[in-house]
Amino acid sequence: MKRNDIVSIVVCAVILLGVFIFNSTVFKNSSELKTIKVGFVYDGDESAPYTYNYIRAQKAIEANYGDNVETIVKSNISEEEGENSLKELVSEGCELIFTTSYGYGEAAKKLAEAHPEIEFCEATCDNADDKPFCSNYHTFMGEIYSGRYISGMVAGMKLKELIESGKITRDQAKIGYVAAFPYAEVISGYTAFLLGIRHIVPEAKMTVRYTNNWTDYTLEKKYAEALIEEGAVIISQHSDTIGPAVACENSSVSHPVYHVGYNDSMLDVAPTTSLISSRINWTPYMLSAVEAVLKGEKIEKVVDAKVFGNDCSAGFERNWVQMVELNTLIAAEGTEDMIEKSIEDFKKGRITVFEGDYTGTDPFDPNDKIDLKGGFVENEKSSAPTFHYVLDDVITIEE
């Protein structure tokens, strides 16, 4: 056979192989990626930092999957209206539904049981592995206590600076916290925040006020103002609006006041008082859940996370928790380095937040107590926080 003939045969073979690979790839992709409708139920809208944090993930889904997804959104839905909104999404043909507040969990699981062909993913809830178990009902949440602890350290460094400069005394290291409900998620968060502060300023104490509502701007602002009037130098929150940040920025009291936010940067509304925020990054889970449904795979096998049955969690190590926009104009010197080191320590498992010479009491059962000398590991067996004890002597619940 001539050399030119051999070359021609080889070239033809390469071309045919390329065509085969191309056709195989196209066929594979078209069979794996279909078009689905993805539903979202929000208790607020873009104006609420909590909801906007989820909307970021929704936009990431739309950008990543383009024509493969059609998103349908229900906004400003109360917990009481949740079931009706979910039924609407079911009737509109959604194959994947994200619910974004604890209060939707019961209704979402109920509909999951009635519609096994639809995947329901409930953020912040704790009932995925409870009976009755539904293979198409999932829960997920980032380990936000770690972000709150670092936020507390940022606040603690500012308090230390104020003390050392003579602007406040150590017994004026008072913290105010606007909280939505006395749930474990909320208690765990404000406890981690205070422990972060006390890591820097051991004398610090906290007063908590519950709004018993997630999205009441007026009440959140009012409670923050009351805590400031009582002497709080640092205000933080586990509530969904910017009310507490606005209260700090507009405060006219004689003592200094600073704010630590949640879910989003508050610098736009509190540029001279907001120190930092922390947030759960919902995007990694929600992108992976969409990918799983598009490919017909089990969600927990696609998501990069700690998996507990049908429940997923992760922290800084998988970018599920983030610190948001340190205000370097007002933060204490050395804060940036501290944040970087602390994030690395969390990634390496070097920090146990709930540990120290503290005791705590369950607010609903005075006989249920805990001693933190031996430590408590949060999110050890679930994505939802389980620490539910109010620390004795250092945290006051104010009606």
Image (cartoon, rainbow, N blue to C red):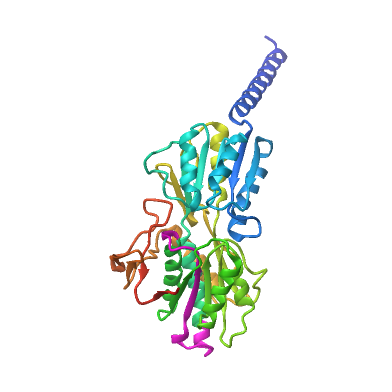
Viewer-side residue, 22 vs 99:
99
Q: Is residue 245 visible?
A: yes
What residue sits 44% from the left and 72% below the top? 194
Q: Which residues are magenta?
A: 161-185
Residue 331 location, x and y as percent? 58, 76
Q: In terms of depth relative to the viewer, which is nearer, 260 or 246?
A: 246
* Quadrant of the image containing the C terminus: bottom left
Residue that extends furthest to the left in the rendered view of this protein: 367
Q: Quadrant of residue 271?
A: bottom right
Question: On the picture, is 43 further left or further right than 315?
Answer: right
Q: Residue furthest top?
A: 1
Q: Is residue 332 visible?
A: no
Residue 286 x/y as whole percent: 56, 45
Q: Position of residue 100 (x, y in %)?
A: 54, 50
**Residue 289 higher or lower than 10, as above or below:** below
Give the vertical position of 30 relative to 216 (above or below). Answer: above
Answer whether residue 93 is magenta in the image.
no
Q: Is residue 3 left or right of residue 178?
A: right
Residue 110 against residue 281 in the figure, above or below: above
From the image, which quarter does the N terminus lie in?
Answer: top right
Query: Foreground residue, 315 or 6?
Result: 315
The x, y position of residue 177, in whole percent, is 49, 72
Total labels drawn = 0
Q: Residue at x 35, y 63 (%)?
A: 364
Task: Tell me which residue sits at (53%, 44%) in the image.
Answer: 83
Residue 158 position (above or below residue 385): below
Q: Residue shown at 41%/71% (left/top)?
A: 195
